[in-house]
Amino acid sequence: MKLRQSMAGLHTWGGLLPSWLLFVIIFAGTIACFDKELSRWMRPALHDGVASSLGADDVRGWLQQNVSDELHAFWMHGPTEREPYWRLGWEVDGTETIHNVAIDPRSRLATPMAETVGGEFFFKLHYNLHAGDVGMYIVGLAGMFMLVALVSGVIIHRRIFKDFFTRRPRANGQRAWLDAHNLFGVVGFPFHLVLAYTGVAIFVASYMPAAAQVSYAGNVMQYFGEVMGSYHRDELHQPAGKPVSLDALIAESQRQWGGGEVGWVSVHHPDDASAVVDIRRRDRSRIASPQDTLTYDATSGELLNRQDASTGYRAYLWLAGLHMAQFGGTLVRLLYLLMGLAGCAMLIGGLQVWLAKREQRGDRSLPWVRALNGAVFGGLPLASLALLWGNRLIPTGFAERAVAEGWVFAGAWLLVALWSVLRRQQGRRLLRGQLLLGALLALGLPLVNGLTTGGHLLASLGRGDWALASVDLFLIAAGLVCAACAWRLDGAGTPAVIRRRSPRVQEA
């Protein structure tokens, strides 16, 4: 009994304080499950479903013609079923700045597509809040809080399975929200526990770097090289010879792997005689991304090394693969999407329980908490929809187009936050207004997509392109849900849990 009582405060405050931050992390991670499909939707050049016919040598040729600076490294990834185009990235020596482009699959020549933040925007928001290492540490701390809230929640709910089957939608607000909190918490408990743990574990080397820094005298790259089994060759500071064909090395790697798929291809110090080419194997059947890598001399094509990762590193990769859901195809990603949405609902339900308890005490801080709820729970989804609108309405040739999309997201979120603060005393009207705006934005996006591109919903469905059509279908479903909820909050549609709050209110 005393254990449950001591855990109650830990669960309440350990879950409440980071709840808004956790909502951002979980919501962004949920969308990131389909980041590649979203990236394709945000690039109209990919809407016709044409796969790229270019080779690795064509992509390298574009880089040589358009980037004259001395390169530290460049890397590329060929077309896949989810991304039917070449991706190219590079780093210029001494800058530590990463450049990335996507190559238009419709062109016979390597031509970058219009710039966009793509679905990767939500992936970065999920793991570092677009704040670099500081954001990564904040997310890690929030993940630890989530682990504490999950474990303490199980301890204090001694009738957790009975409560799971208890539904009281017509009860007072606190009980109804508590039932919803219990339902979504129990349904997704194993998922949330595993994802919270793996989310913290995969960055453990960054959170606790002391051991590696002491053992390797501050040379962390040597530590990672030994753990991964990767190959490194020091620069010779001599001009590089004529490079070997990357397409030929890819074909040789496939032969070495018995027909296995090729993933990332990277070239290190391409302008130096020490240049090497790393070709990594791609295997969609595994939870863990395989680290099978062949390293070749970039000039002679001689095989220099076969990467053999340590057992511990393979276990780490398994945890990372389990967290990132890059296995099992669409069904697994859909399951992660549903469980992620359940996690968001769990957080909202738990915070509403806290509000209902304080409302009975007349707490003066409640309007500000409701304002924060509107700014985060309503602001983030609305800003995400505004980002997609910006992607469609910002001209293709606009300079720094991806940066402009990011500012649309930030500006929209700031406006919703301001709206929530100004209307903090009118919680129900604020919520209804946000739902109506969400319905308008979500339902309007498929229409705008059809008017501005050739990849409208009917065309995608007509050729069986469900990957592209799924984005429009999800937006339509989200818009209809928002509209239905707004209708229920208005007049005759007000839920019974609101209308029948107490006998005294009924008599009045």
Image: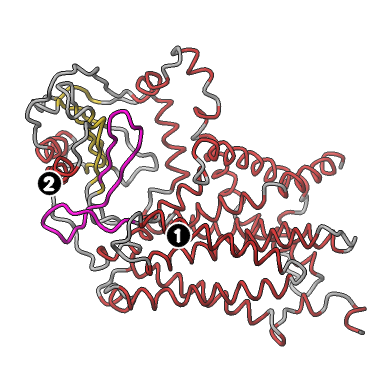
Q: Amino acid at mark 2?
A: Asp
For numbered disc 2, what is the local secondary structure? Answer: helix
Q: From the viewer's perspective, is 11 left or right of 463? A: right
**Residue 102 located within the stretch drawn in magenta:** yes
Residue tagged by mark 2? 58
Q: CA distance from mark 2 to mark 1?
A: 35 Å
Look at the picture and state if 412 lies above or below 61.
below
At a point 20% along the width and 27% down the height, the residue shown is 295
At a point 45% along the width and 55% down the height, the residue shown is 406
Question: Mark 2, mark 1: which one is toward the viewer?
Answer: 2
Nearest the eye: 404 or 225: 404
**Residue 44 located within the stretch drawn in magenta:** no
Q: Counting other residues with Cα less than 10 Å from the Cα at mark 2, is it few (<14), some (14-19), or many (20 or more)?
A: some
Q: Counting other residues with Cα less than 10 Å from the Cα at mark 1, is it few (<14), some (14-19), or many (20 or more)?
A: some
Q: From the viewer's perspective, is 278 left or right of 2? A: left
Nearest the eye: 254 or 266: 266
At a point 40% along the width and 30% down the height, the residue shown is 314
Residue 375 point in image, percent of width and height? 64, 61
Q: Amino acid at mark 1?
A: Leu
* Figure quadrant of the N terminus: top right
For numbered disc 1, what is the local secondary structure? Answer: helix
Q: Sequence-wise, which precedes: disc 2 or disc 1? A: 2
| Residue 334 numbered tag | 1
Residue 307 point in image, percent of width and height? 27, 26
Q: Which residues are magenta?
A: 88-115
Nearest the eye: 160 or 487: 487
Q: Magenta stretch mostly in which secondary structure?
A: loop
